Structures are given as C-alpha cells and as structure tokens.
Image (cartoon, helix red, strand yellow):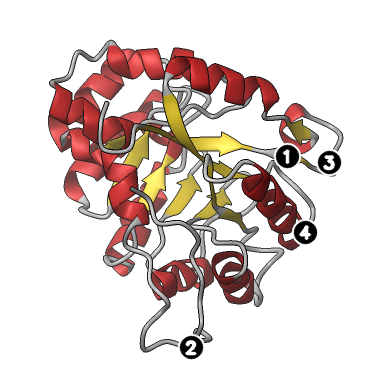
Amino acid sequence: MGAGGVVDAHCHAGPADGLTDPWNTDAPLEDYLRRARAAGIARTVVFPAFDSDYRVANARLAGIVRRHAPRLIGFAFVHCRRDKGRIGDMVAEAVREHGFRGIKVHGYEAMLTREACEAARAFRIPVLFDVVGRAEVMDMIAPQYPDVDFIVPHLGSFVDDWRAQQRVVDQIARHPNVYADTSGVRRFDYVVQAIRRAGPGKVIFGSDGPWLHPGLELHKVKLLGLPPAAEAQVLGGTIRRLLARHRGGAGRRVPPGSSYGEALA
C-alpha cells in the first residue's frame, strides 16, 4: 500500500490504575508493535486504557508516543461525566502540548456530551466514540455537530450486538460525518454490507490492540477483496484525511502558538 502505508486507527497503550481487568490495568505495546510491523502496519492511533484520571493518563501516553515517534498518533481520552467542566482544557493541553490528533470517549463510562463535541469542533479533530451498543445516540449527535467527524468503533458493538451493528451500517450511509471502524467485528458480512452501502471511504481499519492481534484484524480487511484504491481508503486513506483537518481553533477561545506535532504524509 502506498501513500504512507497502513494505519491502525484503534489501539490502547500504557499502564492504568484500575487493576481489576485487562482493560484498566495495562496495555503493553511491545508485542503489538512487533506484530504490527510484521503485518505491514506503518502507523497506529493510540489512547490510554481505562483510568481514574485521564489528564494524567494522557500525559503518560504522550511519553509513550514520544518514545516511539513517529510511529504512534495520540488521541486524548476523556470521561464526559467525571471530567465535566475541564474537557476543553484537557483537549487543548493534549493537542497543543502533546501533539494529539483526536478524542476518545467510551460509553461504558459516560456517553458523549456537548462539551466534548465542542472541543473536537474547536480543533477540528475526530471523536472515536464507543457507543457500547447504543447506536441510536449517533442519530442525535451527528446532526447537532455536522462539522465534527465521529468514528464508531466495532461497528457499534464489541459484544456482537447485531442490531447495533446494523444500525451503524445505516448511519454511516446516511450521515456524512459518521464513520465506523472494523476492530473486533466478528460478523464479516456486516463489514461487507458497510462497504457496499456507505462506500470504502466510511469504513476505517482498526485492531483494538494490543489485546486483539493487528495482523489478524488486518487480514479481515484484506479478505474483503476490495480494489486497490478502495482498500487503500479503508487501510489508511480515510483516517489520514480526517486527521489532516485539525486546526488551531481559528475564531474560538484557543490560545495561540499551538503545536500539532508531525503532519501525516
């Protein structure tokens, strides 16, 4: 694949403080990076594992991103209920100081709010929002923020809720600003339907590493048998395009002198 190579748009990274489950204890990258290199994955979007303080977790992630530069692309994780009132500041810090390029919100903790959407709008960065099966909320959110790009991971449900996944297939076809990623989707024909109905530009490759094997998840996309140009969109073209839209929040209350890190090729 040309034009910069394959981008994995969904991976957790680094330790966390929960210590009760894999997803809130540690997301080690060593094996993931080895497997991704072997699979031909050039860049990876990363965000913290579940944590009790995402400002701290995002700063910790920034160190990981720097150590592996330019391999990793950071997204800021926010908890829309616990971080209420400081999300804008957290995102501004993540973008200006850490060079992060997106926001991650997980509905298991709290559903997406206007505060997080406004922060994404200010910087023109995408929101990766796990709806945890509540796909219907995207029909409320997407029209309210037509200038914000939303990526729904797992086609709407990591636990294989076919109703949610079918609704997300419909949503990415109807809403210009809603996309889906392929991570952890087991019903292969739903990925086929998503491509047929919405087009390859609305489906984004993600692995949900480090816990899912990036090579296996990538092979799932390869098995779609798409024409080279369409496959290139799924495997990196679309996420690069979304990440390239960021800005310093012109005309908004965003401090000057912002730095966004290395531009994507």
Residue 17 x, y percent position in the rendering: 85, 44
10 Å crowding of disc 3: few (<14), some (14-19), many (20+): some
Give the SS element for disc 3: loop
**Which label belongs to residue 14?**
1
Which quarter of the picture shows residue 147?
A: bottom left
Circle 4: residue type? Val
In space, the residues marked 3 and 2 are separated at their CA atoms by 34 Å
- Which residue: 77% across, 33% down? 26
Q: Position of residue 215 (x, y in %)?
A: 47, 15
Q: Residue at x 76, y 48 (%)?
A: 51
**Residue sitting at x 23%, y 20%:** 192
In the image, residue 239 sits, relative to residue 124, either above or below, namely above
Q: Secondary structure at mark 4?
A: helix
Q: Earlier in the sequence, mark 4 or mark 3?
A: 3
Which quadrant of the rendered structure holds the N terminus?
top left
Dot 1, how many residues are within 10 Å of its Cα: few (below 14), some (14-19), or many (20+)? many
Task: Give the spatial CA distance, label 2 vs label 1.
Answer: 31 Å
Identify the residue position indicated by label 3 in the image. Answer: 18
